[in-house]
Image (cartoon, rainbow, N blue to C red):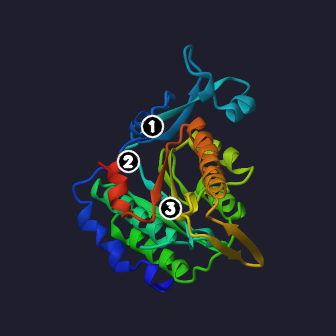
């Protein structure tokens, strides 16, 4: 099986349009409850948009004070928001070298594109605007949210351009950090942002960026993994090579296999707990199963 055979195609992404026609996107509140969290979620309704600033009135929330206008006028003012009629979907799709891996069926990068397509088509069926960004280790493409199929199809085309140029590479925090910075200007207030990628090397500044995004948006994280990353079978003596690094392992040794599995489990658990601490539900998607089936099983789509 060649790496080329594990890539996805535009036909595979557009085929998900019909398969998601009767589906709906679950809310962050529902997903946090499904994961057993007791986290409080700020109710944004369909998204809150800034309307105006007015003179402070007794009972106004302190967090809504317009500090700039208050300082300029010398009198306290409060920001007023109104409920938006839509909650645009913004997809952040990882096509870095860390997603160029598979033991069978499909690359992590292919799984991520199919998951993003299923989510994008579902949002369109709900009448939402859809857009997003796709990034590799060196470049990215941005499609602002818009109505109809054109923005989503443009996102597919940009994603497939990076997808077809995929090459394996170690995890790096910089691509995700740049993507999160881009999201602060790309996503309109009250948007639903879904992060689709490896997610195991977010970097030290990523949590601050995510916390900032979480104040204005609903966020969901989808971690792409291959079962071979989570546990190793008893294959005897093997030699693993990644770039210039070479590692010899005796997989007959159960302790070696246990330590390998434990290292992955701890790494993902740490990331997941940090995300949940920010009220961001997080789910794993395996390359050995279809994206749509897993999204339905996890309750991300209903």
Contact (Cβ within 8 Å) of mark 2 with mark 1: no
Is the residue marked by circle 3 packed among few (<14), some (14-19), or many (20+) residues within 10 Å?
some
- Residue drawn at x 55%, y 78% is 162
Q: Disc 3 vs disc 1: Cβ atoms closer than 8 Å? A: no
Could you tell which of marks 2 and 1 lies nearer the N-terminus? Answer: 1
Residue 300 visible? The answer is: no
Question: Which residue is identified by label 2?
Answer: 298
In the image, 130 versus 97, the foreground residue is: 97
Q: Is residue 295 visible?
A: yes
Dot 3 or dot 1, earlier in sequence:
1
Element at label 1: loop
Along the horizontal axis of the image, is 297 left or right of 90?
A: left
Place of residue 178 in the rendered image (x, y in percent of width and height, measured from the top left):
68, 61
Q: Position of residue 124 (x, y in %)?
A: 32, 59
Q: Nearer the viewer, residue 146 or 247?
A: 247
Residue that carries the numbered disc 1 in the rendered image: 35
The residue depicted at 23 percent of the width and 60 percent of the height is 21
**Numbered tag placed on residue 227 in the rendering:** 3
Question: Mark 3 or 2 closer to N-term?
Answer: 3
């Amino acid at each position: 099986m060649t790496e080329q055979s594990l890539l996805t195609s535009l036909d595979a992404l557009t085929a998900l349009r019909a398969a998601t026609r009767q589906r709906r996107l679950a809310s962050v509140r529902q997903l946090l409850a499904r994961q057993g969290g007791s986290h409080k979620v700020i109710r944004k309704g369909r998204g809150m948009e800034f309307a105006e600033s007015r003179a402070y009135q007794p009972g106004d929330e302190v967090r809504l004070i317009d500090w700039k206008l208050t300082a300029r006028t010398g009198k306290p003012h409060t920001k007023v928001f109104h409920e938006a009629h839509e909650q645009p979907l913004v997809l952040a799709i990882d096509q870095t070298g860390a997603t160029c891996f598979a033991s069978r069926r499909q690359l992590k990068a292919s799984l991520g594109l199919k998951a993003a397509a299923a989510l994008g088509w579902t949002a369109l069926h709900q009448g939402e605007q859809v857009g997003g960004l796709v990034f590799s280790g060196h470049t990215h493409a941005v499609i602002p949210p818009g109505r109809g199929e054109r923005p989503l199809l443009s996102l597919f085309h940009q994603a497939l351009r990076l997808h077809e140029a995929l090459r394996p590479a170690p995890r790096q925090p910089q691509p995700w950090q740049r993507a999160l910075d881009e999201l602060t200007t790309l996503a309109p207030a009250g948007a639903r942002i879904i992060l689709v990628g490896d997610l195991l090397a977010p970097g030290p500044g990523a949590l601050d960026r995510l916390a900032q995004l979480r104040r204005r948006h609903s966020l969901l994280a989808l971690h792409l993994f291959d079962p071979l990353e989570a546990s190793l079978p008893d294959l005897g003596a093997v030699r693993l090579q990644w770039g210039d690094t070479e590692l010899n392992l005796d997989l007959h040794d159960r302790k070696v296999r246990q330590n390998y599995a434990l290292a992955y489990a701890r790494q993902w658990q740490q990331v997941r707990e940090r995300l949940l601490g920010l009220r961001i539900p997080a789910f794993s998607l395996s390359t050995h199963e279809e994206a749509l089936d897993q999204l339905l099983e996890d309750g991300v789509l209903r």
